[in-house]
Image (spheres, helix red, strand yellow):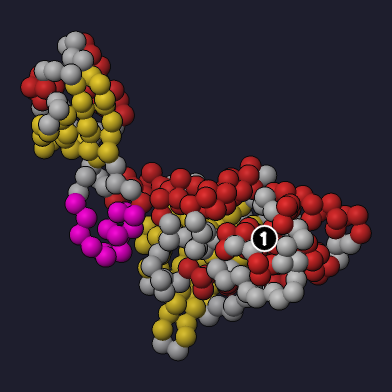
Amino acid sequence: MLKINNLVKKYGNFKAVDDLSLHVKKGEIYGFVGPNGAGKTTTMKIVSGLLACTSGEVYIDGIDALKNRRLVKRKIGYMPDFFGVYDDLKVEEYLEFYASIYDIEGKEKDELIKDLLALVNLTDKKDAYVDDLSRGMKQRLCLARCLVHNPELLILDEPASGMDPKSRIEMKNILRTLKDMGKTIIISSHILPELAELCTNIVIIQGGKAIISGTVKEVMDNVYKTKSIKIKVIENADNVINTLKEYVEVSNVKTLVNNIITADFNGNDEVMSSILERLIMKKIKVVDFTTMEGNLEEVFMKVIGGENIEEH
């Protein structure tokens, strides 16, 4: 759905985007991760046709977006991180205004607005003034506005910024619904655990460059070469330790309180299954057998070098 090739955006001698290349497939929820000033918003604005690039290529659904901006804009729904001010405008009037921009009128407009308000859970707020809405409601209304022309690609810049936990959950559920409808979604966020839950793929950007990309699991596996395993048993912790030491894939075995054993593990799922099978064959009463992997926040900090993260 989206291909970015060698994208560059310069401001004088400063490169806000530096030779960035990405490929987002149709139907993905693709996460942009990076510190402030990494180039996420700049890239999103270039893709949306709101900012000219210095060099590079952008293709949306096979169309050269830099040479056919008017054509591709109908395929894009862009949601900025700042909603704006709309004095004396009601929710329904707000959507009617944007529907009129796309020449949607009459019964079609009425049905569209009804469906969009239902999608973003704002049906009971249609007669409320926009400025009286909560931050979360405004964000959902802004998302509804992006959907007025039924775009195939949604570009959402910090859609959950400033939301309370309830509003963030509502936004996540809406985005999952949109994915099920076949939309391709690019989303930037500082709420990294939620990106890990939501996104099919992510890219970590720093200094305008793509540092690492892939599925969340691929990125984590790339950063963390070893996992940790944790085993809790009712008794015979020493027997568990002896069993673990038989595997070359296991190292740094430790015994914690309450018959909990941890160890570093660099094997695959088959080896993991073999360990559990051996423990059961030895009639060791296993209460818990889990892997402990780094979370996306830790991966982010390790990749950008923001702090020293203990290896798992």
| Number of marks | 1
Is 304 included in the stretch rendered in magenta? yes
**20 or 308: which is nearer to us?**
308
**216 or 256: which is nearer to us?**
256
Residue drawn at the location 55% of the way across and 61% of the way down: 159
Is 307 included in the stretch rendered in magenta? yes
* Start-end of magenta stretch: 297-310
Question: In the figure, 260 relative to 32: above or below?
Answer: above
Identify the residue position indicated by label 1 in the image. Answer: 141
Q: Position of residue 66 (x, y in %)?
A: 64, 72
**11 or 99: which is nearer to us?**
99
Point out the image quarter for the N terminus.
bottom right
Q: Does residue 195 appear left or right of residue 220 in this picture?
A: right
Amino acid type, residue under disc 1 in the picture: Leu
Question: In the figure, 277 relative to 4: above or below?
Answer: above
Q: Residues within 10 Å of mark 1 (few under 14, many from 20)?
A: many
Residue drawn at the location 13% of the way across and 18% of the way down: 235
* Residue 279 can be seen in this image: no
Residue drawn at the location 38% of the way across and 44% of the way down: 217
Q: Position of residue 279 (x, y in %)?
A: 20, 17
Q: Does residue 125 appear left or right of residue 217 in this picture?
A: right
Q: Position of residue 77 (x, y in %)?
A: 66, 62
Point out the image quarter for the C terminus.
top left
Residue drawn at the location 28% of the way across and 34% of the way down: 291
Question: In the figure, 117 relative to 257: above or below?
Answer: below
